[in-house]
Amino acid sequence: MALSLTLPTAAGTLAPYTLRGTTPAKPDAGVTFNRIVYSAAHVVADPLAAIDPWLQCAVDWDTTIAYRRHLFSLGLGVAEAMDTAQRGMGLDWPTSLELIRRSLDAAKDVPGALVASGCGTDHLNIDDVKSVDDVIRGYEEQMAAIEALGGKLIVMASRALARVAKSPADYERVYDRILSQAKQPVVLHWLGDMFDPALAGYWGTKDVDAAMDTALGIIAAHPDKVDGIKISLLDKDKEIAMRRRLPKSVRMYTGDDFNYAELIAGDGFGDEPTHGKSDALLGIFDAIAPAASVALGALAQGNTEKFHAILGPTVPLSRHIFAAPTRFYKTGVVFMAWLNGHQKHFTMVGGQQSTRSLPHFAELFRLADAANLLEQPELAVQRMKTLLALHGVEG
């Protein structure tokens, strides 16, 4: 018998909805990819902690790390302590470092597991940051702590740097210093202001093409210290243009949660493999992990039709989850984990479960069903009904 429930509509009414999707395909054991793929992973809050959720951070460590093991089992790497983990939106630096330590420990049990960890300046009191030298010291402190654990760095965009830098030269000075000290090649991180308004004008200008020139110049000066760059501008043409200009040894890690399917598939441009396709470092892969794994496995086998058939239907869901205000996308990612039974509650660090409306969640539910992403449909319906009841909607 088909599963049904009553859902809110965008018009503010209620309407019956009957599930029509299938459960996600499962990857073959030992699935391999021909792309480097990181899923930026979420954290699971501890709802039993006696804290002030807006002011303090409490993590359910066992469930959080269990989800990383789930991602590893699907062949996905983990981009740890990034914005998907609510870095800068509830997850502080001491908790981030503990998260990195635990993820690296978990990865030791999984041959070939990939972990790269966010290194930033978010432990600084931004009002006390007066100079570029303060930013450098902030990066160096987190860099030393992560490298002491044996971690690979993702050099995150810095709110403090965006605030104090006066020109592209200030960015060049900071990144030259950090890259020259890195123990292994890093992933750079260019997060657009749609994800974080405090990063407007990153690389010293609001002109994206000029900003790209600055970033490319920094990479060209240190090609042996840069594994790749993740850009999250939600503009596929900008990503492709930058991808084609990277040194041949440097990867483009797409962070485009609107256009990831076609960017990962690539256009085959040029003689260098890195110029014709993107690898991936995506928050949406947390929410669609099984489908992503099967699709990437098909792509590695040369079956691009199957790749697009599986991944294509997930794009409307991703665009909804990452809709403006984009910075609230983490709520949709955690909601998916709850619907799919990867955590027992829909509570987030910082109380961020409140950042989206009930109609938003209802449409997310419909899109997840349409994309065949509900792993346990009966459980998903039960949990959606629980959320509806909390908002006064019965049926």
Image (spheres, rainbow, N blue to C red):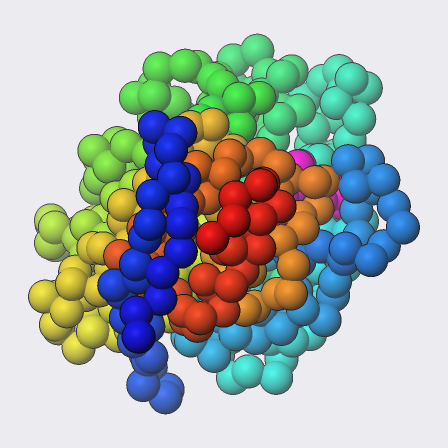
Give how far across and how far down residue 215 sits, in percent. Answer: 41, 31
Taking 218 as reference, is 118 left or right?
right
Residue in the image at 30% along x and 59% along y: 18
Residue in the image at 74% along x and 65% along y: 61
Q: Tell me which corner region of the image, top left, top right, bottom left or bottom right, holds residue 183.
A: bottom right
Give how far across and how far down residue 90 sits, in percent. Answer: 71, 40
Q: Tell me which corner region of the image, top left, top right, bottom left or bottom right, holds residue 66.
A: bottom right
Residue 86 magenta: yes
The residue nearer to you, when weighing 312 against 172, is 312
Taking the view exactly as shown, the residue that stands out farthest to the bottom is 29
User: Which secondary structure class fits the magenta region best?
Assistant: loop
Residue 175 magenta: no
Q: How many marks?
A: 0
Give how far across and how far down residue 133 sits, in percent. Answer: 72, 25
- Relative to residue 289, is residue 42 depicted above or below? above
In this rendering, does residue 193 appear at all?
A: yes
Give how far across and how far down residue 119 sits, in percent. Answer: 64, 46
The residue nearer to you, when weighing 197 against 214, is 197
Quadrant where the N terminus lies? bottom left
Taking 300 as reference, is 29 left or right?
right
Find the magenta span and give its range.
83-93
The residue nearer to you, when weighing 132 against 109, is 109
